[in-house]
Image (cartoon, helix red, strand yellow):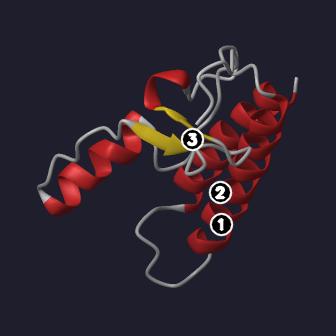
Amino acid sequence: MSETDPHIHVDQKVMQASAGGRNAMVLTLGLVPDSPSVVTTGCGLQVPYAMTSPRPESVTCLACREHAHREHLSWAEQVERLSRWPGAPFTGDQAAEAAKWARDLAKRFSG
């Protein structure tokens, strides 16, 4: 971990690191996870959790922005693919809305 790194990074597990991901864990398992003090970032560094952000406007590390861009696009594709399976837990319209949200966020990370 570099104490002199001035950049704001994104957590390597960008889709699970958000408040929504934490809330889903609470609802599913009934457990409230502690926030980690140090995380591995999209660029592979280990930095204090406080030096990460899920907001594209705050992330200054280019490698992390690229990582988050790819992860959001991948997640959008997965949601759309899963919505076509029989017995999917969400409708095609819900999947389309979630995929649109992820692609919009991916676009913000790339810009």
Report the mark closest to the observer, 3 or 2: 3
Q: Which residue is mark 1?
A: 78
| Classed neighbour count for the residue bearing mark 1: other residues with Cα under 10 Å, few (<14), some (14–19), many (≥20) | few
Q: Disc 1 vs disc 2: Cβ atoms closer than 8 Å?
A: yes
Q: Amino acid at mark 3?
A: Asp
Q: Is residue 35 above or below residue 44?
A: above
Residue at the (16%, 46%) spot, across then down = 32
**Residue 75 marker:** 2
Residue at the (68%, 54%) spot, across then down = 76
| Distance of label 3 from label 2 (alpha carbons) | 15 Å
Q: Which residue is mark 3?
A: 11
Nearer to me, 82 or 41: 41
Nearer to me, 17 or 61: 61
Residue at the (45%, 31%) spot, across then down = 49
The residue lying furthest to the right in this view is: 111
Residue at the (77%, 25%) spot, across then down = 108
Label 2 secondary element: helix
**Residue 99 marker:** none
Q: Is residue 83 above or below residue 63?
A: below
Quadrant that contains the N terminus: top right
